[in-house]
Image (tube, rainbow, N blue to C red):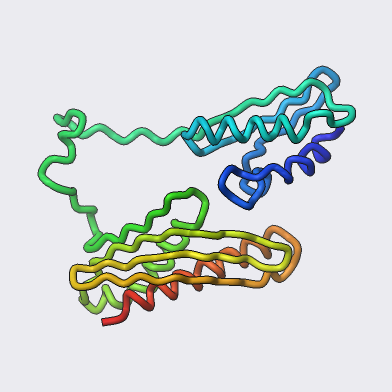
Amino acid sequence: MTAEEIKERLKTVKYPGFSRDIVSFGLIKEIDVDAKRTQIRLYVVTQNDEVTRKIVEDVEACLAGAPGLSPLDIVVERHQEAPVPAVPGARGREVGRGGPRRVPGVAKLVAVASGKGGVGKSTVAANLAVALAARVAAGRDADYRVALDVQRFESPADAVLIEALWTVTSKEARQSGRSVVREKIAARDYASLAAAHSAALAALSKEIAAALRKP
């Protein structure tokens, strides 16, 4: 069995809690096959041991009994967060005393959070920043908090589907909404899939930004 054949089989292994497979999520870093062993190197970002254990078990189950497969060796590499630079004269939680520190050159902060990884928080945050740029430049208050709960983030054969619940909170009001965005995938290639993902996230961001603009 070749590395490509193994990779095709692994496309049936879903990431725990998601409808997408571990191959499309980029967890398969390397597959090395020879007569003595088949080594699969996984790269995981999560620090949840249960999720990692489930992925390994599902990979083993997927390849169990595969014809012509040499003994399986699964290696897991974990993403390591960059260390936070130490603050001179501070120890432990004492860094946070006195309230939050201001970010140089940034007047307002908008927090975009999700209970899951890989659902487009960075893209949504970037699009919100662009949508709010004119408002901030005009000197109007942009002190909002946006909570985003992505319920579905799927890529069926011909389209990208995102379903999300969101809440916009300011000092004066609180507004919640539900968005369902569907973007057609132009072609069956990675570039078209990525473009459809970006378009869907941009559409979601515009809906949230519209709520932010309401007086």
Give the x, y percent position of residue 142.
25, 70
Q: Residue furthest left?
A: 98
Using the image as rendered, state which of residue 18 and residue 188 is in the foreground: 18
Q: Is residue 203 above or below residue 17?
A: below
Residue at position x 50%, y 30% in the image: 49
**Is residue 208 left or right of 117 when viewed as pictured?**
left
- 16 above or below 195? above
- Please give left or right for residue 171 compared with residue 74 in the image: left
State how many labels appear: 0
Where residue 53 sits, quadrant-wise, is top right
The location of residue 14, given as percent across then percent down, is 65, 45
Q: Residue at x 83, y 22 (%)?
A: 70
Point out the image quarter for the C terminus. Answer: bottom left
Which residue is pictured at 76% across the width and 28% down the height? 32
Quarter where residue 108 is shown: bottom left
Instruction: Indicate the quadrant where residue 181 lies.
Output: bottom right
Q: Quadrant of the N terminus?
A: top right
Between 57 and 144, the residue placed more toward the observer is 57
Is residue 23 or residue 147 the one in the foreground?
Answer: 147
**Residue 127 place in picture, x, y as percent:** 43, 67
In the picture as drawn, the residue positioned furthest to the bottom comes out as 215
| Residue at left offset 44%, top offset 63% | 124
Depicted 27 relative to depicted 114: above or below: above
Q: Residue furthest top?
A: 36
Nearest the camera: 70 or 66?
66
